[in-house]
Image (tube, grey):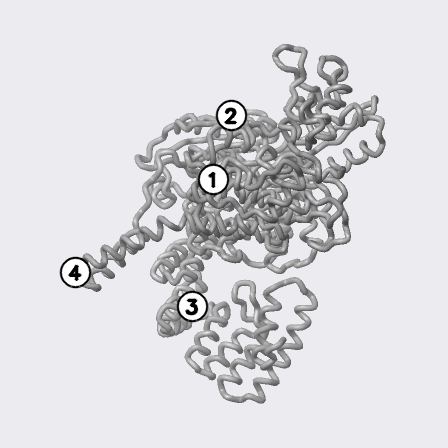
């Protein structure tokens, strides 16, 4: 009798099918495993698997077992080299001499080891004992399964269930990237690792046991692959998994299993049941979904529609990929979260009606709304009690080159303090602009911090003298000061001591992990530290000026030298990855080789400190800048944020992603940029990007205020002055402020005319002034018109001017020349979007609609 026709239940311990013959006597799989493996249940030499030691329970005789499966048993174990706990899966003793089974077990480990994702338990070692027992070690996920949570506390709230589904879907997206299927998704294979820290119902989860994982079919639906046996857990398996002899299941089978899992989270039961595999499959095809279960849980209609598609018996009617599913899940969550905002708008309409009925009228309402918005945008945020800026340390050494050493000391103290979640720390980009300043009240008000740390460094031969002082900016009084005279090799210990004592003075709470971060030295090599500090200064200068690639290339060279001295210099690897990604993003080197260099640096960082937030932040930037993998980058940022509470780069990057990804949220992006500015208030680039978000949202009044902040940092910056005047062109189609600004700069600062030639050209085109446009084009010279990363070549601009003058023959000639020139640019960088954009505009000008 075929398996699909037997009476069926399944073992609660290992999930293996039970037929009517064996169900009364127990699970044959577990009975078999319990026989030959019994010897492993008494402590002895067989507890050791290379450098892993299986743990025993309190009775000292029973091994600490975590779970059983068809191929082996998973134990709690300890890596004796590192002293860290792991989950160790050991092949069943009855398979130890079976070469085919051993090879399958190895492939199982290889498949799971391919995945590196925050929502997947990681496999990191495969080994074999002299006795022939195969095993592999994986991340020990401590917590409870979703199944245990639901059985103990009942169904989850809808938002919490959707949050879990999103995280599992992100894991499936990662699996799809490696063409892997899980094949046994169910609540007992999803571990809760943390509850919502903010008191919400949200949970963070990891998918475990990719032990049934296998390569996905090359095609979906009608592939050539045929599967001949059932793998998985019946209640959560797709119809195609239950039908032996049909096409191999593909990614849509995992989507079905996730749908059944979400159903269980919301209702506490599976959507379909059956005494046999055949009966279960027939119910999946013939019986409608028991919607009364889901409606009783007050699940919104949009979520029900998504679940119906996920649980469709026909795979073609389900979401066709994990990425597509993830987008739908996010839309469902955002629709639910938007309900309070809709309610708020109704209250606004009610207030408007009250004003009108009382005679106040529309004028009063709109005046009041404008007043509130303007007041909110100009209000000064409160100064946090536990907040600090670490100012540049003064170099008192005779050798001016030691200035880099002083900056490195300041940078390391800042980096250590920034790891503390209970303390607000201003980013280095903003504090470096106060080098040599002594007005602490003014600095505190500008940066919105209650304290500043200042210091000095004198390096004399093999000796170092460091002085540090903590100042309360509200009273301009010294809170704490200390001097250090020590051997130069003690500098890293001094940096840790300063950070620890400052935290004590500010009465901040420090977790064990934060304490470890403060004590950890950046490197073991002083030469590497000096080279790294020089590279950091070059990066800082480039971030401030955003011009050319020279500083980035020089910084990369210095970091490579630092890593030659200390290959384990974690922060140097992360900084190097960032530089390679910037060179790629800004078109300085748009080649696959540049991405490979970034990826190599990130992989090195993960080998050194796989749990560090900086490594996840580097990977997030790499996924976004190199591959436009928005979901993957957001997942990495979520992990990075747990240990980088004061890193403005995290919020800046999230703002870019939210603004750019399909279906992105412009308001959310703006909030991210504003959070970044709070931590890095004088970062010119972030302010510039914030002004762009205000422009996208048509919030022109706030956009002007941001430009005012930028001009407070760079009061003579010609481009910023012109950009501020451009706001009126966008807002009111009024070119006069822009024209007046250009005329004023022509008189007061004629040297800036070349730098703003592009803006002069745009103004002349808007005003239909051919003579002014030609003058601007002459001033522009051979430099292309640059709009951020999009560059328009000279023939294209000549064509625009000719068309404005109604000289169509000259215009077509210019556009043809522009196309020939642009095609060369595209051939040189075929995968660079901006150059293709310009080619499309040229084709539009030539009337070549299809191209």
Residue at position x 56%, y 46% in the image? 537
Instruction: Indicate the position of residue 729 as horizontal and vertical percent values.
Output: 39, 71
Label 1 secondary element: helix
Which residue is label 4 attached to? 357
Give the distance between the C-alpha atoms of the residues marked 1 and 4, in whole angstroms: 43 Å
Question: Camera-side residue: 57 or 79?
Answer: 57
Q: Is residue 267 left or right of residue 564?
A: left
Q: Are marks 3 and 2 in contact (CB under 8 Å)?
A: no
Disc 1 and disc 3 in contact, CB within 8 angstroms: no
Q: Nearer the viewer, residue 268 or 734?
A: 268
Label 2's element? helix
Task: Please identify the quarter of the rendering in which residue 40 is found.
Answer: top right
Residue drawn at (37%, 57%) of the image: 708
Q: Residue furthest left?
A: 359
| Local secondary structure at mark 4 | helix
The residue lying toward the viewer, choosing from 420 and 745, is 420
Q: Is residue 603 above or below residue 750?
A: above
- Left or right? Give the position of 770 relative to 784: left
Q: Nearer the viewer, residue 444 or 247?
A: 247
Residue labelled with disc 2: 512
Return the disc, 3 or 2, that comes first in the chain's sequence.
Answer: 2
Q: Secondary structure at mark 3?
A: loop
Is residue 300 in view?
Answer: yes
Separation of disc 1 and disc 3 at Cα? 59 Å
Residue with the mark numbered 3: 749
Question: Residues under labels 4 and 2: Cα distance?
Answer: 60 Å
Q: Nearer the viewer, mark 1 or mark 3?
A: 1
- Seen in the picture, residue 452 relative to 75 is either above or below; the reply is below
Horizontally, residue 271 falls left or right of residue 371, namely right
Mark sitting earlier along the chain (1/4)? 1
Which sits earlier in the primary sequence, circle 4 or circle 2?
4
What whole-number distance in Å separates the C-alpha atoms at marks 3 and 4? 56 Å
């Amino acid at each position: 009798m075929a398996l699909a026709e037997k009476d069926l239940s399944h073992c609660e311990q290992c999930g293996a099918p039970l037929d009517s013959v064996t169900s009364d006597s127990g699970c044959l799989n577990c009975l078999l495993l319990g026989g030959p493996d019994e010897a492993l249940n008494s402590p002895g030499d067989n507890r050791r698997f290379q450098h892993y030691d299986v743990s025993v329970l309190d009775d000292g005789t029973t091994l600490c077992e975590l779970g059983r499966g068809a191929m082996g048993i998973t134990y709690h174990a300890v890596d004796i080299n590192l002293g860290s706990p792991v989950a160790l899966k050991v092949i069943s003793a009855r398979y130890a001499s079976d070469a085919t089974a051993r090879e399958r077990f190895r492939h199982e480990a290889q498949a799971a080891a391919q995945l590196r994702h925050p929502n997947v338990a990681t496999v990191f070692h495969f080994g074999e004992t002299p006795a022939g027992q195969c095993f592999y070690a994986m991340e020990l996920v401590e917590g409870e399964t979703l199944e245990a949570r639901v059985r103990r506390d009942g169904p989850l709230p809808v938002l919490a269930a959707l949050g879990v589904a999103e995280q599992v879907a992100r894991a499936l997206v990662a699996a799809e990237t490696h063409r892997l299927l899980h094949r046994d998704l169910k609540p007992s294979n999803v571990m809760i690792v943390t509850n919502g820290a903010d008191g919400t119902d949200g949970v963070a989860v990891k998918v475990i046991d990719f032990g049934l994982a296998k390569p996905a079919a090359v095609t979906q639906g009608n592939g050539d692959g045929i599967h001949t046996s059932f793998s998985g857990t019946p209640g959560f398996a797709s119809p195609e998994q239950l039908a032996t002899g049909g096409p191999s299941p593909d990614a849509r089978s995992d989507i079905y299993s996730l749908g059944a899992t979400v159903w269980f989270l919301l209702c506490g039961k599976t959507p379909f049941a059956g005494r046999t595999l055949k009966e279960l499959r027939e119910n999946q095809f013939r019986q409608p979904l028991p919607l009364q279960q889901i409606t009783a849980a007050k699940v919104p209609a949009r979520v029900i529609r998504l679940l119906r598609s996920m649980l469709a018996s026909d795979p073609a009617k389900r979401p066709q990929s994990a990425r597509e599913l993830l987008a739908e899940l996010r839309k469902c969550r955002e629709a639910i979260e938007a309900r309070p905002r809709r309610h708020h708008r109704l209250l606004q309409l009610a207030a408007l009606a009250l004003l009108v009925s009382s005679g106040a009228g529309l004028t009063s309402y709109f005046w009041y709304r404008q007043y509130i918005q303007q007041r909110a945008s100009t209000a000064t945020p409160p100064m946090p009690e536990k907040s600090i800026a670490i100012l540049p340390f003064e170099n008192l050494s005779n050798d001016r080159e030691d200035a880099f050493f002083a900056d490195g000391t300041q940078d390391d103290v800042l980096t250590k303090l920034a790891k503390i979640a209970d303390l607000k720390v201003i980013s280095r980009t903003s504090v470096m602009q106060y080098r040599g300043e002594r007005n602490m009240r003014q600095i505190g008000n500008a940066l919105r911090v209650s304290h500043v740390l200042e210091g000095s460094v004198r390096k004399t031969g093999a000796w170092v003298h460091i002085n540090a002082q903590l100042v309360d900016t509200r009273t301009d009084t010294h809170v704490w000061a200390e001097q250090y005279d020590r051997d130069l090799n003690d500098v890293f210990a001094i940096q840790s001591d300063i950070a620890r004592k400052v935290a004590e003075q500010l009465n901040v709470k420090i977790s064990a992990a934060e304490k470890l971060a403060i004590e950890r030295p950046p490197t073991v090599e002083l030469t590497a530290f000096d080279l790294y500090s020089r590279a950091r200064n070059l990066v800082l200068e480039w971030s401030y000026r955003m011009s050319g690639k020279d500083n980035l290339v020089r910084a990369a060279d210095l970091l490579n030298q630092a890593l030659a001295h200390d290959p384990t210099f974690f922060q140097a690897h992360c900084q190097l990855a960032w530089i390679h990604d910037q060179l790629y993003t800004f078109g300085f080197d748009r080649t696959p080789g540049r991405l490979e260099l970034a990826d190599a640096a990130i992989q090195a960082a993960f080998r050194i400190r796989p749990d560090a937030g900086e490594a996840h932040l580097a990977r997030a930037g790499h996924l976004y800048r190199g591959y436009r993998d928005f979901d993957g980058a957001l997942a990495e940022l979520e992990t990075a944020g747990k240990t980088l509470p004061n890193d403005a780069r995290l919020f800046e990057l999230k703002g870019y992603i939210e603004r750019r990804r399909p279906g992105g949220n412009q308001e959310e992006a703006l909030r991210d940029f504003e959070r970044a500015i709070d931590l890095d208030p004088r970062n010119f680039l972030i302010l510039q990007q914030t002004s762009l978000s205000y422009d996208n949202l048509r919030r022109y009044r706030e956009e002007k205020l941001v430009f005012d902040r930028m001009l407070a940092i760079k009061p003579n910056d010609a481009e910023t002055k012109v950009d501020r005047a451009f706001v009126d062109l966008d807002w009111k189609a009024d070119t006069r402020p822009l024209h007046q600004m250009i005329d004023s700069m022509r008189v007061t600062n004629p040297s800036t005319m070349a730098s703003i030639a592009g803006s002069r050209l745009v103004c002349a085109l808007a005003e239909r002034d051919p003579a002014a446009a030609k003058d601007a084009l002459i001033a522009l010279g051979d430099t292309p018109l640059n709009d951020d990363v999009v560059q328009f070549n000279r023939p294209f601009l000549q064509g625009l001017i000719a068309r404005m003058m109604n000289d169509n023959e000259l215009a077509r000639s210019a556009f043809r020349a522009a196309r020939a020139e642009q095609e060369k640019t595209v051939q040189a960088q075929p995968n660079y979007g901006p150059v293709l954009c310009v080619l499309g505009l040229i084709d539009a000008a030539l009337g070549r609609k299809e191209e």
